[in-house]
Image (tube, rainbow, N blue to C red):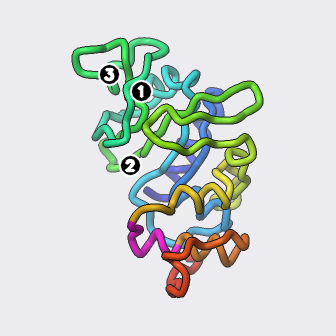
Amino acid sequence: MDASAVLSLAALLEQEGIFFCLQGGWGIDALCGCQTRAHKDMDVLVNLCCLGRFIDLMEVQGFVCKLIWEENAWIAAPSPLAMIACPGAPEKAASAFVLRNAAGNELDVHVIEMDAAGNGTPCWNTEEVFQAVDLQGKGTILGRPVRCMSAEMQMLCHTGYTLEEKDCNDMYLLNKRFGTALPAELQGQAVSGQCE
């Protein structure tokens, strides 16, 4: 998924007042201010209160549900959401899923419930909790400002499981750029990622 597709979707979500926060590969590249590698998808956190409008908007954009993640938890839907509805229980919706359009662009979506202070509680099965500061990272893609997850939270979200080489490189880039502490299992590995 290229930078122009990410920016186009980000602009559309902003225009519609839908809260989202970039995470994953594009979120890390936004923090670094340059594209370091190719990305298969755009990872986003979406606020539960915006989920209905988000799904409606993505449906208009030609997206369909590709898969429901294993960590998914079925949640009460703010409105009927056929695209991500629970089989046999249409009043419930997925909280961790992937959408794909005909152009091959993919959105890896995880839903959070935000409180008045801007903290986010994940709706999927995880022990992570996002403080407001974790969701207020500032980055750029092709020079355009975007909201993204903080470097510290990116690091925390990429630990505790076996990482692919690209993910290890991402963690080293965050360490080099922001001084975020590397977990013990990554120390001593080399970084190959460079800005394109």
Q: Which residue is mark 2?
A: 105
State left or right for residue 83 relative to residue 31. Answer: left
The part of the image, by quadrant, that contains residue 14 is: top right
Q: Amino acid at mark 2?
A: Asn
Q: Which residue is mark 1?
A: 60
Q: Are marks 3 and 2 in contact (CB under 8 Å)?
A: no
The magenta stretch is 162-169
Residue drawn where x is 64% and y is 51% of the image: 149
In which quadrant of the rendered image does the N terminus lie? bottom left
Residue drawn where x is 59% and y is 28% of the image: 113
Q: Nearer the viewer, mark 3 or mark 2?
A: 3
Q: Are marks 1 and 2 in contact (CB under 8 Å)?
A: no
How much space separates mark 3 and mark 1, taking CA atoms?
Answer: 17 Å
State left or right for residue 161 relative to residue 154. Answer: left
Q: Which mark is residue 80?
A: none
Q: Which residue is mark 3?
A: 85
Please tell me whether mark 2 sits on a helix, a strand or a loop: loop
How much space separates mark 3 and mark 2, taking CA atoms?
Answer: 21 Å
The part of the image, by quadrant, that contains residue 173 is: bottom right
State left or right for residue 13 relative to residue 92. Answer: right
Residue 119 to residue 104: above or below:
above
The residue lying toward the viewer, choosing from 24 and 17, is 24
Q: Amino acid at mark 3?
A: Ala
Q: Amino acid at mark 1?
A: Val
Disc 1 packing (10 Å; few <14; some 14–19; many ≥20): few
From the top left corner, tell me how far across and down residue 66 is, in percent: 28, 40
Nearest to N terminus: mark 1 or mark 2 = 1
